[in-house]
Amino acid sequence: MAESLSTPSQTVGPYLSIGLPWPDGPYVVPEGTPGGVWIRGTVFDGAGEPIPDAMIETWQADPEGRFDHPDDPRGAGAQGFRGFGRCPTGTAGDYGIFTVLPGVVPGETGAPQAPHVDVSVFARGLLHRVVTRVYFEDQDNSGDPVLASVPEDRRHTLIAAKTKDGYRFDVRLQGDGETVFFAL
């Protein structure tokens, strides 16, 4: 009788950074857009090492809080605003997304949510993407129902720090300072 070999489980990497990015993926808006900012950071594994073959995807509302999606009940977003970005990490685990700050959007109960960007992280060792949010330290995050649902001592993992040309948001997949991820 022949020995049966099983196929090992597959993860989402490391080849995702080869086939999924596109040339203008990191640009949610074109360079030179008024109010344009960079969200830059590094993706770290559980040992605190940078991950050179991960990918960051972002989805956000426009500055008026509308999405470029037919299901947005408030109507279409800004003309030409795609609201979506995708950037593979570099050899040092770094990424950058050029965008504009999103506006306030209504939550499930209609309560306003603070300006935020939804982030999906794909990396080797993950069977499925992990999802988090980026909030901005210089915006009013008080009263945001999602942020308020996170234990106070972990909220800082969702807040991007202001820099000279935008914000810094590092992603830690495990270990000390692990980023808060949400179940969808």
Image: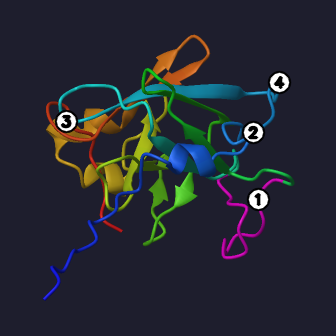
Which is closer to the viewer, label 3 or label 1?
3
Could you tell me how far apart the alpha carbons at marks 3 and 1 are, in whole angstroms? 38 Å
Could you tell me how far apart the alpha carbons at marks 4 and 3 are, in whole angstroms? 37 Å
Q: Is mark 3 on a helix, strand or loop?
A: loop
Q: Please name the residue that numbered disc 2 is placed on.
A: 23
How far across and how far down the image is residue 129, in percent? 39, 57
Could you tell me how far apart the alpha carbons at marks 2 and 4 are, in whole angstroms? 17 Å
Q: Which of 92 and 36 is in front in this view?
A: 92
Q: Which image quadrant for residue 29?
A: top right
Q: Residue at the location (14% across, 31% down)? A: 176
Which numbered disc covers residue 52? Answer: none
Q: Decide if residue 134 is on the left or right side of residue 37.
A: left
Q: Is mark 1 on a helix, strand or loop?
A: loop
User: Callout 3: 10 Å neighbours few (<14), some, many (20+)?
Assistant: few
Which is closer to the viewer, label 2 or label 1?
2
Dot 2 or dot 1: first in sequence order is 2
Which is closer to the viewer, label 2 or label 4?
2
Q: Which amino acid does label 3 sit on?
A: Gly
Q: Please name the residue that numbered disc 1 is placed on.
A: 77
User: Callout 2: 10 Å neighbours few (<14), some, many (20+)?
Assistant: few
Q: Please name the residue that numbered disc 3 is placed on.
A: 46
Dot 2 or dot 3: first in sequence order is 2
Q: What stretch is highlighted in magenta?
A: 65-78
Q: Which amino acid does label 1 sit on?
A: Gly
Magenta-drawn stretch contains 2: no
Dot 4 or dot 1: first in sequence order is 4
Could you tell me how far apart the alpha carbons at marks 2 and 1 are, in whole angstroms? 24 Å
Count of all numbered marks drawn on residues in the image = 4
Q: What element carries label 2?
A: loop
Q: Decide if residue 126 is on the left or right side of residue 29.
A: left
Q: Which image quadrant for residue 42?
A: top left
